[in-house]
Image (cartoon, rainbow, N blue to C red):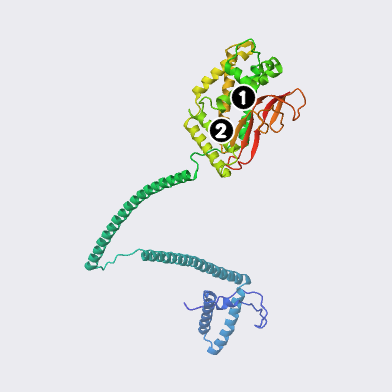
Amino acid sequence: MGSQGPKPKPETAPRPQTKMSDLPKVEVPLYFAVDQTTPPVKQEEQGDTIMSSDSYLSSDGLNPKEAAVDVDHSVSAQSYSATLDWTVGEILEMQEANHAAFMKEYRTATSQENTNLVQLVKSELQTGVRNEVQGSMDQIFKYIKGLVTQPTQTADSSEIAALKSQLRAEKTHTKDLTNHYNRLVQASNKQKKDLGKANAKLNEALLERDQLRKLQGGGNLANSEKTTDDAIRGKWKELQYNISCLAHLLESDPSDQHLDDCVSMRLRFLSGSYRRLWKDEDYRQLLMAGYLWVLIQEIVLDSEYPIWGGPGSKHFKIVRDNIIDHIGESENVLDKELSIPHIARWLAQGSTMMSKLWDKDHAVLQRLVNVEAKCLRPFYSGGQPRNDRSEKSILDQLRGIMDSAIELDKMMMCSKAIFQVHWRDRSQKPDLTQRYNKDVMVSEAYENDLSPKSRVRFYISPVLYKVGTADGQSYDSRMVLAKGVVVCE
């Protein structure tokens, strides 16, 4: 078949001739015109149309120039017609399709790049941390390896032998040092024992030296007690109170009863007219209190019986009183101020030693209490005790008086101060009747107003004098520590 030209279009109304300059311009995007990826569909169709027109012209046997002119006009018209066939919507759709494809490709590429980037960052981080940890561990291992002494692997047999020999020498030296230390310890222990024995001997020698010095200088053979004046005075008042309580129970008139000789002698020592005074009830209790004080003076203070201090206590007190009286009355004693302290210290030391060697004899004391309580029966109320309880009460009170008197006697005998008990005022002449002296006496009862001229009927309790101090000083001073209790006219 021969080629045919384009099909004739159906007849339509003739169109007006339009110039190219009068055609509307359609702007095509630049990327659309130059995009090499866009498939050339329209261009190929245009090429086919041109080729088809060329064949048609040739088949009609036209002149080539004329045919070329016609072809140019035909192509221009056809291109314009094809261009007009592309509507704005198609162009926009094509543009959107290209844009969507571009964005899809971009997103795909971007997502892939992000994934690769994240993996790359993770890989770098892991690699960096691993490298840092590995580096730190390497440094630690190197430090530890530096601290640990590695044995020399290249030591030869000669070095090993030398080290073994040195080790044996060190062991031998250590053993020698240990033995030497043990010998030093033993020697030190022996020296400590010897030093202890030497110290003991030295202490004994020093003690003997001190004792010899005391003997040579008249020092203490026994520590005499430093009893205060308040202690002596307090014990004296205690004894005075106990005597007053017992005298209150012994105020019966014994005129119709026989009195023991010792009882009559003690009452006569108080007053020659004691029988007449006993008739007066106001004097009975006072006379009985005086009687009990005389009993204490005789048994305890004068040590007629060895209650304490042993069998020689009575003679010791006699010697003591004689020495004191001799020093006090003599005017020609050489170095009097020096001799009195020595004598007082010697007497105090002797009393202390006797007190420690012979303490209170309870058996002798109880026997004396029973004897004296029996002598006091005529003075019981009604001549006899009402019952055993009342007699036991009198025995207990008399035993308490004896105990207090013994304690008082020890305190005075063992002190360096000199205590003297007198039943008269030593400032008055002994052959004259005693007058009331307020500095030495306290009147318990009197008939007339007291004055220095008031006559003393009898003493209820003696006067306690003190010479010197408990420290062995001031023997040139005398004081009344306890006043005598008297009854005046």
Q: Which residue is denoted by mark 2 in the rendering?
A: 321
Asked if residue 90 can be seen in this view, the reply is yes
The residues bearing labels 1 and 2 have C-alpha atoms spaced at a distance of 20 Å
Compared to residue 290, the image places residue 62 above or below, namely: below
Using residue 147 as the reference point, say whether residue 489 is left or right of it: right
User: In this orientation, which residue lies closer to the viewer: 178 or 78?
Assistant: 178
Compared to residue 19, the image places residue 274 above or below, namely: above
Q: Residues within 10 Å of mark 1 (few under 14, many from 20)?
A: many
Q: Position of residue 117 (x, y in %)?
A: 49, 67
Asked if residue 63 can be seen in this view, the reply is no
Q: Which residue is situated farthest in the right direction here?
A: 449
Q: Position of residue 412 (x, y in %)?
A: 57, 33
Q: Element under label 1?
A: helix
Q: Residues within 10 Å of mark 2 (few under 14, many from 20)?
A: few
Compared to residue 66, the image places residue 269 above or below, namely: above
Task: Check residue 293 in the rendering and tell me which mark sits there, or answer none.
Answer: 1
Task: Check residue 16 in the rendering and tell me which mark sits there, or answer none.
Answer: none
Q: Residue at x 59, y 82 (%)?
A: 76
User: In this orientation, which residue lies closer to the viewer: 100 or 120?
Assistant: 120
Q: Position of residue 50 (x, y in %)?
A: 53, 81
Q: Residue at x 69, y 14 (%)?
A: 279
Looking at the rendered structure, the kind of residue marked 1 is Trp
Using residue 448 as the reference point, say whether residue 339 is left or right of it: left
